[in-house]
Image (tube, rainbow, N blue to C red):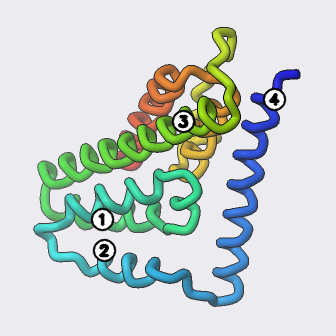
């Protein structure tokens, strides 16, 4: 009768399969096309491009499905630490750009999930759907992206899901800054 929960569950299954594939590729020492080059580029980037590096790293990692294949969290941490060595202003701007990049990725996730929900599976949002932040289990970018997509597909109002995600992202960015 109500297939929205089924579709939301499928989002998590796809995420789990993606992470298992990524784990298998890492265990078998396989190279993921393009990722090694991007990681090398971002790791060796000139200090004047540190902001762009932080923004791009977290944006890519924050995208549903794609972010599972991109080791952005470690890059974001490295970029944040390097920016801290350049002074407090650089550090704070880097944190701000991390938050903005991650938030834009969330906007893309929510928008694409809404399009998928409305046009492909033809389900609208449910007024009684309860949006939960779940900060302790979804603070990591790959988990947050899966969770927000699952909530939208499951019937959550896209704007409410996005606002919930912004709260979690803000607190996680503060934690990284700490």
Secondary structure under badge 1? helix
Pick the quarter of the image with the N terminus: top right
Labelled pair 1, 2 in contact (Cβ < 8 Å): yes
- Label number found at residue 115: 3
Splitting the image into 4 quarters, where does residue 175 fall?
top left
Q: Mark 2 = which residue?
A: 42
Could you tell which of marks 1 and 2 lies nearer the N-terminus?
Answer: 2
Could you tell which of marks 1 and 4 lies nearer the N-terminus?
Answer: 4
Labelled pair 1, 4 in contact (Cβ < 8 Å): no
Residue at 39%, 35% (x, y): give it. Answer: 170
Question: Which residue reaches farthest right?
Answer: 1
Residue at 77%, 45% (x, y): give it. Answer: 10
Cα separation between marks 1 and 2: 9 Å
Horizontal side of 36 relative to 9 (left or right) equals: left
| Residue 177: x %, y % from top left | 33, 47
Q: Mark 4 = which residue?
A: 3
| Residue 137: x %, y % from top left | 64, 41
Cα separation between marks 1 and 4: 42 Å
Q: Mark 2 Cα within 10 Å, few/some/many (few <14, many 20+)?
A: many
Could you tell which of marks 2 and 4 lies nearer the N-terminus?
Answer: 4
* Residue 136 visible here: no
Residue at 52%, 59% (x, y): give it. Answer: 67
Could you tell which of marks 4 and 3 lies nearer the N-terminus?
Answer: 4
Secondary structure under badge 2? helix
Disc 1 or disc 4, which is closer to the eye?
4
Disc 3 or disc 1, which is closer to the eye?
3
Q: Mark 1 = which residue?
A: 79
Secondary structure under badge 4? loop
């Amino acid at each position: 009768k109500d297939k929205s929960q089924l579709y939301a569950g499928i989002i998590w299954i796809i995420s789990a399969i993606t992470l298992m594939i990524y784990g298998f590729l890492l265990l078998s020492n396989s190279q993921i096309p393009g990722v090694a080059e991007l990681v090398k580029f971002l790791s060796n980037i000139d200090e004047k491009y540190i902001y762009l590096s932080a923004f791009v790293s977290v944006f890519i990692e924050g995208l549903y499905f794609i972010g599972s294949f991109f080791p952005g969290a470690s890059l974001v941490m490295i970029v944040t630490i390097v920016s801290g060595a350049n002074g407090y202003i650089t550090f704070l701007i880097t944190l701000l750009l991390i938050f903005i990049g991650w938030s834009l990725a969330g906007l893309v996730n929510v928008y694409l999930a809404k399009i998928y929900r409305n046009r492909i599976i033809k389900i609208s949002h449910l007024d009684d759907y309860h949006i939960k932040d779940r900060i302790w289990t979804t603070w990591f970018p790959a988990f947050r992206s899966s969770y927000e997509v699952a909530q939208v597909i499951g019937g959550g109002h896209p704007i409410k899901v996005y606002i919930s995600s912004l709260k979690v992202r803000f607190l996680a960015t503060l934690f990284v800054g700490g």
